[in-house]
Amino acid sequence: MVGKLMAKVIAEIQDWADVKLRRLCGRITPDQRVVVILVMFVVFGGLSVYMTVAAIYNIGKSDGRELGIEHIDPIRLKNDSIINPFNNE
């Protein structure tokens, strides 16, 4: 019930956005469309390159803290253990 309602709402939002975009794009000339596409390509491409370079630059940086590696202590079992019943520690 809820899934069908959500699907219907999402479909209505998509249709509304499609109509608005078609109206907006129908008003500009083909040359203006090319300019808009190129500007969007440059902006999104620049953001993509920035995010990639920033992620690579920040690899291994953790505010001066190093990852602490410690040995795992062995589990101390009770003397009446089923695993080793003859251990008298």
Image: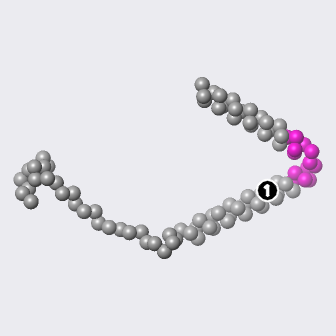
Q: Amino acid at mark 1?
A: Met
Q: Residue at x 6, y 53 (%)?
A: 86
Q: Residue at x 78, y 39 (%)?
A: 17
Give the residue furthest to the bottom. 64
Q: Is residue 37 left or right of residue 69?
A: right
- The residue singled out by tag 1 in the image is 40
15 lies above or below 33: above
58 lies above or below 88: below
The secondary structure that dominates the magenta segment is helix
Q: Secondary structure at mark 1?
A: helix
Q: Residue 21: which quarter of the image?
A: top right
Residue bounds of the magenta highlight: 22-34
Q: Residue at x 70, y 61 (%)?
A: 47
Would you say residue 48 sits in the magenta stretch? no
Q: Is residue 34 left or right of residue 57?
A: right
Q: Residue at x 9, y 60 (%)?
A: 89
